[in-house]
Image (cartoon, rainbow, N blue to C red):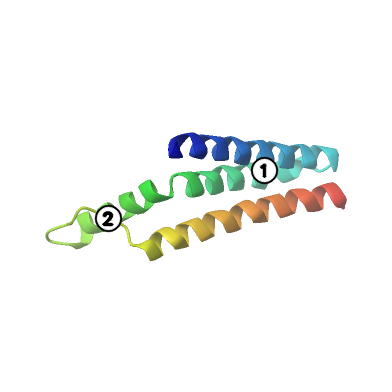
Amino acid sequence: MKQKYDIRFLICQIAVAVLGAIGFFAGGRPEGLVVYLPDMVLSIAMIYFNYSLCKWANRWHGFWNERNPGSGEPSRYFQLSGKVGGWFLYLLGLGCAGLAWII
């Protein structure tokens, strides 16, 4: 059930990102897509793959900096900061798309 919800949420995020890209064309500023598309891809990946990215970062850090690395389980703070960062980038991109449409 949760996986079905996650896939639907991902599809909705991508659909909104595509509408934002259309906003750049409708606003007559397609050059803004150079910044918008990487921003949206990165933010959607940060939101959807947050736990996996946090776990990978912990394992990588443990491999290089600890004598006996652990399982790599991320803390809730690390996961929350990744989600907040991903949502910030996502909303920043959508705000830029909205401004390109209006201005």
Instruction: Give the left or right position of residue 40, taking residue 95 as reference.
Output: left
Few, some or many residues within 10 Å of mark 2 (<14, 14–19, 20+):
some
Kind of residue at disc 1: Val
**41 lies above or below 58:** above
* Residue at 50 percent of width and 49 percent of height: 47
Q: Which mark is residue 64?
A: none
Where 42 sits versus 92, above or below? above
Residue closer to the observer: 89 or 73 = 73
Residue pictured at 76% horizontal, 37% vertical: 22
Residues at discs 2 and 1 in contact (Cβ within 8 Å): no
Q: Quadrant of the N terminus?
A: top left
Say if 81 sits above or below 10 in the image.
below
Identify the residue at the far left of this view. Answer: 68
Give the label on residue 34, or none: 1
* Residue positioned most to the bottom: 77
Q: Amino acid at mark 2?
A: Glu
The percent coordinates of residue 48 (x first, y second) are 48, 44
Mark 2 vs mark 1, CA separation in Å? 35 Å
87 vs 33: above or below: below
Given the current orientation, which residue lies at the most extreme front position?
1
Query: For mark 2, what is the residue?
Result: 73
Q: Secondary structure at mark 2?
A: loop
Where's residue 9, x and y in %? 56, 40
Horizontal and vertical percent for residue 45?
Answer: 50, 44
Which numbered disc, 2 or 1, marks the residue closer to the eye? Answer: 2
Residue drawn at 32 percent across, 58 percent down: 74
Percent position (x, y) of residue 57?
33, 54
Q: Secondary structure at mark 1?
A: helix
Q: Earlier in the sequence, mark 2 or mark 1?
A: 1
